[in-house]
Amino acid sequence: MIRGLRAELEGRIDVDGPKLAASLGKLGLVDEYQIYLRPFVLRKGAPCFAEAQPPLRLVSSDRVGEDAMRLMYVGVSGEQYVSSPAMGGLPAITL
């Protein structure tokens, strides 16, 4: 379904949520990860990369408001997902 949307639509398709991001990433459908970091503590919640971290390269970062940072990553082609400790943050995924 997502592959069909990408073929039909121009521009960005934004999605969020760690489970959806992970499943789309494994299918090679994520062009860019935007992870927003904000200094507060959650006692529960789903980590962004619970199973394995995709190979990523930081391409930019910027401040969002007074208390958050946006980190923009792109996938590194030709590399495999690697096991890693879960990362925090809330992803906004660009397809």
Image (cartoon, grey):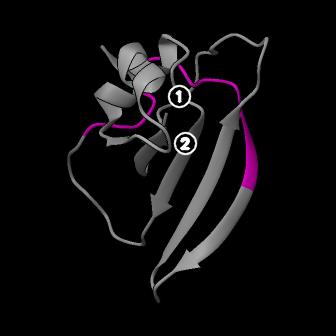
Q: Is residue 90 left or right of residue 28?
A: left
Quadrant occupied by the N terminus: top left
Disc 1: which residue: 30
Magenta residues span: 46-59
Disc 2: which residue: 33
Residue extending farthest to the bottom is 66
Q: Residue at x 42, y 69 (%)?
A: 38
Q: Is residue 84 visible?
A: yes
Gap in angstroms between the C-alphas marked 2 and 1: 7 Å
Q: Using the image, determine if residue 23 lies above or below residue 58.
A: above
Judged from the image, the secondary structure of the residue bearing numbered disc 2 is strand
Name the spot of residue 3 as percent of width and height, x first.
Answer: 42, 15
Judged from the image, the secondary structure of the residue bearing numbered disc 1 is loop
Depth check: 51 or 95 in front?
A: 95
Q: Is residue 23 left or right of residue 62?
A: left
Q: Is residue 23 visible?
A: no
Quarter occupied by residue 21: top left
Q: Residue at x 30, y 26 (%)?
A: 19
Name the spot of residue 14 as percent of width and height, x first.
Answer: 38, 44
The disc label shown at residue 68, or none: none
Q: Amino acid at mark 2?
A: Tyr
Q: Residue at x 38, y 15 (%)?
A: 4
Depth check: 50 or 77 in front?
A: 77
Q: Residues within 10 Å of mark 2 (few under 14, many from 20)?
A: many
